[in-house]
Amino acid sequence: MMKRHTKLINISYEPGIKKNMHNRQRYFILLFPLSRLFFFIFLVNTANVFAQVKTIDTQVAPEIDYEKTDAPMPTVRLVSYSGSVKYITTELLKNDANLFIMMFKPGCSHCENETRMLEQHSALFKKSKLVLMTSPVQQEILPDFVHELHLADYASIYVGIDSGDFISKAFLYQSLPQINIYNADRKLLKIFTGDVPIDSLEGYIQ
């Protein structure tokens, strides 16, 4: 019967080979933490990108000062109390002439006097349009004001109740009435408050 001999083979390496293997081990040890470091940097950069995108998305547009000369006109939307139209809007008032918007309160004597003065000189408004605007709280007394001053007889005069927050954006809260004048591009030209003579307005009427 034959005996099987197991021969242990002792593998020895030359000094150069041992050095190379030792270097590979050191390289692997260094590579592992570096890979984690690179991954951490990637995560930080990704988070910064998303943070920048979120900042851009949530950035609030600067507030417009509607009282400043050359400021854009706020959106006009009125419930009409004159003529056959139901609403008086920015589109309806669009033309190539200056626009006059008078904010007033029915029952205010200064407002009534200013309105009568404008009626007397309505022939001057050949191209320019005139809007008389009041707040929703005046809804009950506005019809009487329109009737007593015969405002429905003047095609160039629009009367309505603000339903688009125009007054809250453009009114100075100084005195009544207040007349804002906008150019054809609907940029603010001038603001008058209180009793305004026709001589002061005439230079803007077209």
Image: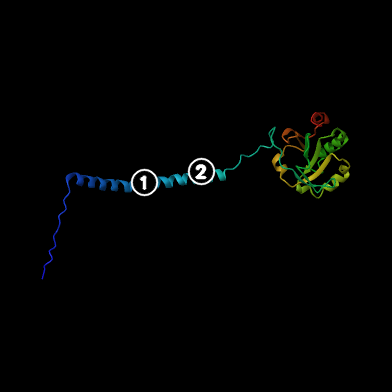
Calculate the distance from the C-alpha at mark 2 to the C-alpha at mark 1.
23 Å
| Relative to 33, residue 180 above or below | above
Q: Nearer the viewer, residue 178 or 26?
A: 26
Pinpoint residue 33: horizontal percent, then vertical percent: 33, 47
Q: Residue furthest bottom?
A: 1
Type of amino acid at the residue the image marks with label 2: Gln
Type of amino acid at the residue the image marks with label 1: Leu
Query: Quarter holding the N terminus?
Result: bottom left
The circle on residue 37 is 1
Q: Residue furthest front?
A: 1
Mark 1 secondary-structure assignment: helix
Pinpoint residue 114: horizontal percent, then vertical percent: 83, 36
Q: Quadrant of residue 119?
A: top right
Pinpoint residue 59: horizontal percent, then vertical percent: 57, 43
Pinpoint residue 97: horizontal percent, then vertical percent: 79, 34
Q: Residue at x 82, y 30 (%)?
A: 202
Q: Residue at x 89, y 42 (%)?
A: 153
Instruction: Count neighbours of disc 2 (C-alpha within 10 A) and say few if under 14, some if 14 to 19, many if 20 or more.
Output: few
For marks 2 and 1, give the one nearer the viewer.
1
Query: Quarter holding the C terminus?
Result: top right
Q: Quadrant of residue 103?
A: top right
The circle on residue 52 is 2
Mark 2 secondary-structure assignment: helix
Instruction: Count neighbours of disc 1 (C-alpha within 10 A) and say few if under 14, some if 14 to 19, many if 20 or more.
Output: few
Q: Nearer the viewer, residue 40 or 83?
A: 40
Q: Quadrant of residue 195?
A: top right
- Asked if residue 177 can be seen in this view, the reply is no
- Asked if residue 132 can be seen in this view, the reply is yes
